[in-house]
Image: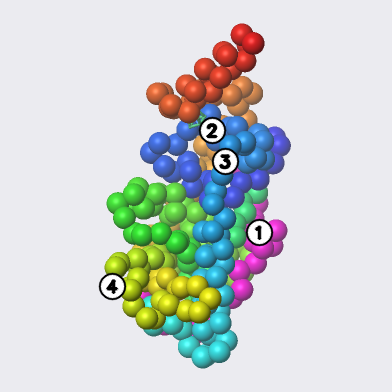
């Protein structure tokens, strides 16, 4: 059995109702380096900026921002480790589960909260992604406890929603000499803590990864149909 290295984020894809075994198999076999995958870097930059804002708040003011009050009684933070130091082996399936948490906050009762930052409006579409985010955060909880970072008592998504209404756009607060500001309003969404619920996903990931041949994709997927057409065309040329 070859060890399967999988991030908690990709494991989360298995929890989505529209999960595609074919896409998953391809991603795993190519080290998640499929072509034509373009993700705008601006979101990673804003998430990294959010982390600096939260840490800076503690470092400079020795208190948490008010907009994190729904997380609990926060007394500090832990700098989230790189994925190479935030991982664990799931022995039964020989899976190396990795992760890179956005925010790890210390709570007054000695436990920790793990937060994932999202730069997005909280909409119905975000709700549809909850199974994926829940798996991802529970994966982080599993790893955090395994590496003895602390007992995890809280998981949450922190949405930083751009405030883009006309009134805000025309207010003096956003006007600066070298550009303009865009306020972000924070919304906290609690996520159920249930690391034990990941077991069926580990099993399924192992079964799919071990398939000797590529499995079928989702029926009626337009992208795969286009790919088939391209392959047909290439053969004719
Ligand atoms: S069916 Fe769609 S989702 Fe699945 S491999 Fe093809 S393009 Fe990807």
- Residue nearest the viewer, comparing 199 with 44: 44
Residue identifier under label 3 = 37
Q: Secondary structure at mark 2?
A: helix
Front tag of 3 and 4: 4
Q: Which numbered disc, 2 or 3, marks the residue that appears first in the sequence?
A: 2
Report if the CB atoms under discs 4 and 1 are less than 8 Å apart: no
Residue identifier under label 2 = 23
Residue drawn at point x = 50 percent, y = 73 percent: 179
Q: Dot 4, how many residues are within 10 Å of its Cα: few (below 14), some (14-19), or many (20+)?
A: few
Q: Which residues are magenta?
A: 69-93
Q: Position of residue 186 (x, y in %)?
A: 38, 71
Residue identifier under label 1 = 83
**133 lies above or below 164:** above
Among the 4 quarters of the image, the one containing residue 191: bottom left
State yes or no: Cβ of the residue under disc 2 lies below 8 Å from any atom of ligand 1: yes
Q: Position of residue 21 (x, y in %)?
A: 51, 31
Label 4 – label 1 distance at C-alpha? 42 Å
**37 lies above or below 117:** above
Q: Secondary structure at mark 1?
A: helix
Front tag of 1 and 3: 3
Label 1 – label 2 distance at C-alpha? 23 Å
Q: Which numbered disc, 1 or 3, marks the residue that appears first in the sequence?
A: 3
């Amino acid at each position: 059995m070859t060890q399967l290295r999988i991030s908690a984020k990709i494991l989360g894809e298995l929890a989505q109702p529209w999960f595609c075994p074919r896409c998953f198999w391809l991603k795993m076999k190519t080290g998640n380096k499929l072509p034509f995958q373009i993700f705008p870097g601006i979101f990673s930059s804003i998430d990294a900026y959010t982390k600096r804002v939260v840490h800076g708040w503690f470092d400079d003011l020795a208190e948490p921002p008010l907009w994190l009050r729904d997380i609990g009684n926060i007394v500090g933070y832990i700098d989230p480790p790189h994925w190479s130091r935030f991982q664990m082996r799931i022995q039964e399936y020989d899976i190396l589960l990795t992760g890179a948490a956005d925010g790890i906050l210390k709570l007054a009762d000695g436990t920790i909260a793990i937060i994932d930052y999202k730069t997005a409006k909280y909409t119905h579409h975000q709700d549809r992604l909850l199974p994926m985010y829940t798996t991802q955060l529970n994966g982080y909880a599993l790893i955090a406890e395994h590496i003895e970072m602390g007992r995890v008592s809280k998981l949450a998504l922190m949405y930083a929603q751009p405030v883009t209404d006309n009134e805000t756009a025309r207010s003096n607060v956003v006007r600066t000499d070298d550009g303009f500001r865009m306020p972000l309003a924070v919304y906290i969404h609690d996520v159920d803590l249930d690391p034990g619920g990941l077991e069926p996903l580990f099993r399924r990931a192992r079964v799919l990864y071990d398939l000797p041949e590529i499995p079928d994709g989702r029926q009626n997927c337009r992208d795969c149909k286009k790919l088939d057409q391209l392959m047909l065309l290439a053969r004719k040329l």
